[in-house]
Image (cartoon, rainbow, N blue to C red):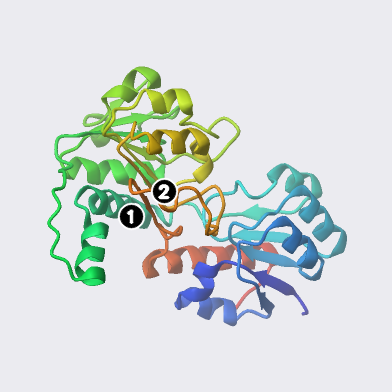
Amino acid sequence: MDLQVLLTSTSFMDTPGKHQELLARLPLNIHTKRGPLNEAEMLDCIAHYDALLCGDDALTAAVLQKGHAARLRFVSKYGVGLDKIDLQAARDLGIPVTNCPGVNQVSVAEHFFALLLAYLRNIHTEHNEVQGHGRWTRLTGHEMFGKNLLILGLGRIGTEIARRALAFGLQVYTFDQVEITDQNLKQQIQPVHDLEAALPDMHFISLNLPLLPTTKHMLNAERLQRLRKDAVIVNTARGELVDQDALLEALKQQRIGGYLTDVLDVEPMPETHPLRHLKNVLITPHIGSRTFDSVERQGLMAVENLMKGLNLEV
């Protein structure tokens, strides 16, 4: 068997575990390129591979068409988000695409609180002051307890955030088209039906929606205008859920309290990214699900999906 597979997920490559061991045991020729690869990079190499084990690479219609015309027959997406893949083109070409739902929600939910707590208690700033500059600068922070949290998107990650938020003593509100099914949560959290009316009362907003045409710029200029001056937005989903131009204006004019994000509209972040040097912004490089535990779970599922798609056994 001479099956050629391209692996581009850096989380998969950089984190040792059972997922790497399983992949190594398969009768495959594995080629690696550090993603995410843009459309031009994918077009340059796609014709050489029977399958992909990819991250957030640009699998556009043009890329998939070129791959299909050569030898591409299966795409195994490491991770959950499929917004970088033209799924309609994949369906039209008969190329199956799988992803890894239900394996990263704990890690991402914990990262949400890591970001929020670090920002509210100035952990990142204090660390730089003490260890970077040798200064004993004592800043005054804020508590989470008793504040209002609005979760936009109550899927697996949003649900995990809600459970932990209740333990922290937050008042939890949710906005989603899907009805809450967890009866225990249903009794403790408040669904929001009028987003515009609810926004002015929210101290914290968690973005946990998939990126779709209907959710792009979910937080637009008008909705950002409605927020409290001390409101903090936490984005562990996709950068394009927020209108960046409107966000920059709101941050620069200090019309909102802060923006904490694990995702950007362009990744990896260019040095000139406009959010980079703003003091009321905290950025991490898309590491919400990058824990040894989560990477191994996602990696194993991605490899198992690949095995099924290519009819392989160990």
- 122 or 35: nearer the viewer: 122
The residue labelled by disc 2 is: 236
Image position of 164 with respect to 30: above or below: above
* x 49%, y 48%: residue: 274
Q: Which mark is residue 38?
A: none
Q: Secondary structure at mark 2?
A: loop
CB-based contact (under 8 Å), mark 1 and mark 2: yes
Q: Secondary structure at mark 1?
A: helix
Residue 292 location in percent, x, y? 38, 70
* x 61%, y 61%: residue: 36
> Tag 2 or tag 1, which sits nearer the N-term?
1
* x 52%, y 36%: residue: 245
- 308 or 205: nearer the viewer: 205
Quote the CA–CA distance across marks 1 and 2: 8 Å
Q: Amino acid at mark 1?
A: His
* x 22%, y 47%: residue: 120
Residue 73 location in percent, x, y? 76, 61
Q: Which mark is residue 111?
A: 1
Q: Quadrant of the N terminus?
A: bottom right
Residue 228 location in percent, x, y? 29, 27
Residue 253: quarter of image: top left
Residue 222: quarter of image: top left
Task: Bin the neighbour count of mark 1 within 10 Å (Cα to Cα): few under 14, some 14-19, many 20 and up.
Answer: many
**Residue 294 as seen in the image, left or right of residue 150:** right
**Residue 66 as seen in the image, left or right of residue 146:** right
